[in-house]
């Protein structure tokens, strides 16, 4: 598999190889000792078959726009809330000595 990755990397960097004829790419694949199934997928430009042969699954990503009513500067729900310990201390009566 490293040969395939190296070949694809080289093909991406080499403009001549990227624009080479089908026969030239086939010769380059043979010289790189790429397996016949992988050669076929590359020559056919069949990305899904190439990914399957390399053991790669599809990676999907989705982005959703935020709500329109959320504006910058509005209060954020993720702000830190006072700790429970702080709340309990505020509720306990304090003596005059503790207030000093």
Image (cartoon, grey):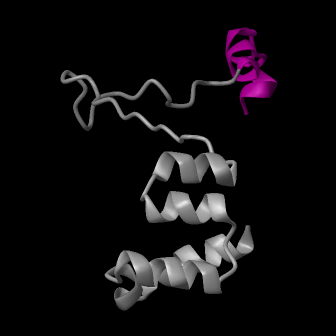
The correct choice, above or below, for 92 with respect to 31 in the image is above
In-front residue for pair 60/13: 13
Span highlighted in magenta in the image: 84-100
Q: Specify the principal SS of the magenta part.
A: helix
- Give the residue drawn at x 45%, y 52%: 46
Residue 24 seen:
yes
Q: Is residue 52 left or right of residue 1?
A: left
In-front residue for pair 90/23: 23
Q: Is residue 90 left or right of residue 66?
A: right
- Give the residue drawn at x 25%, y 37%: 72
Where residue 97 sits: x, y (%)?
Answer: 80, 26
Quadrant in which residue 1 is drawn: bottom right
The correct choice, above or below, for 43 with respect to 30 in the image is above
Where residue 34 sits: x, y (%)?
Answer: 67, 73
Where residue 33 sits: x, y (%)?
Answer: 70, 79
Quadrant placement of the C terminus: top right
Where residue 68 sits: x, y (%)?
Answer: 19, 24
- Give the residue drawn at x 20%, y 21%: 69
């Amino acid at each position: 598999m490293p040969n395939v990755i190296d070949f694809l990397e080289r093909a991406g960097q080499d403009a001549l190889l990227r624009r080479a004829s089908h026969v030239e790419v086939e010769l380059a694949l043979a010289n790189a000792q790429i397996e016949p199934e992988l050669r076929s997928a590359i020559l056919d430009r069949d990305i899904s078959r190439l990914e399957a042969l390399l053991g790669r699954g599809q990676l999907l990503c989705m982005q959703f726009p935020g709500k329109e009513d959320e504006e910058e500067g509005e209060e954020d729900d993720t702000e830190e809330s006072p700790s429970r310990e702080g709340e309990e201390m505020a509720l306990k009566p304090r003596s005059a000595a503790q207030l000093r």
